[in-house]
Image: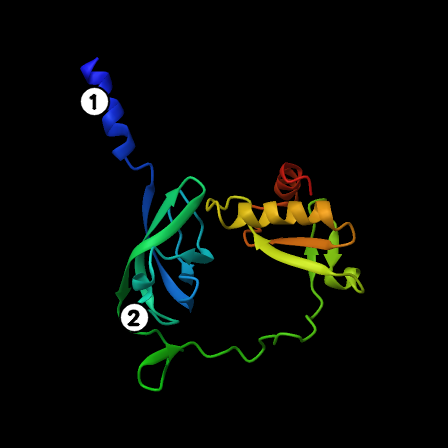
Amino acid sequence: MKAALLLLLILPACSCARRIPARGMVLQIDPARQTVLISHQEIPAYMSAMVMPFRARGSGELAGLYPGAQIDFQLVVRRGRSHIERIRLRGVPPDGVVEDQGDRFRIPVPPNKIAVGEVVPDFRLTDQAGRPVRLSDFRGKVVAVDFIYTRCPLPEVCPRLSANFARLQGRFADLVLLSITLDPDHDTPEELARYARIWKA
């Protein structure tokens, strides 16, 4: 009885968080939302290398960061949410990152970046049935686009995007919802069809 009571007292203090070391490059910082966009290396047995937004544990974690900064950080994942902490700068700014006004760094804007309000050039993708699809196929319709991948482990990223699209699908019959995978090597048409069935897309 004493052992059982001791176990019950200990369990609430235990943390069910998973803590995973990671490394990457800062692309964008949003102090107001306490988020940082990171191009990260593969996180073994958890996530492929890609660009992903992360929520910082606190605004102090973002101090000293700048676009182009090479960092080590710890990804903390709990049920339903995640954040990063213990962010550490590594080395000096990489090539292509320039100093701006002596105290900030920025990555030059690519010359072919599409500005807000400009027409998106046509492109061709392959859908979950293996058929070619062009953006121009939806001309004259309202199209919402998100970027996901089916193995995404962060609960507040791809699963939340897909859940939001599922809600939109139920409310707006004429809205075209286009989810584009960031992991085409794994997300074959067959895998995307399986994922679509989960979300009743």
Tell me the residue at 40%/58% (across/down).
Answer: 40
Tell me how far mark 1 sits from mark 2, CA to CA. 44 Å
Mark 2 surroundings: few (<14), some (14-19) or many (≥20) residues within 10 A: few
Rendering coords of residue 50 (x, y %)? 46, 56
State the SS at label 2: loop
In this rendering, does residue 97 appear at all? no
Verify CB contact (< 8 Å) between mark 1 and mark 2.
no
- Residue 113's place in the image compared with 23, above or below, is below
**Which mark identifies residue 158?**
none
Question: Which labelled disc corresponds to residue 6?
Answer: 1
Three-letter amino acid code at disc 2? Gly
The amino acid type, in three-letter code, at marker 1 is Leu
For mark 2, what is the residue? 64
In what quadrant of the picture does the N terminus appear?
top left
For the point 31% across and 45% down, which residue is it? 19
- Comes first in the chain, label 1 or label 2: 1
| Colouring scheme applied when the structure was drawn | rainbow
Which one is in front, 88 or 41? 88
Q: Is residue 72 left or right of residue 53?
A: left
Report whether 6 appears left or right of 194: left
Quadrant position of the C terminus in the picture: top right
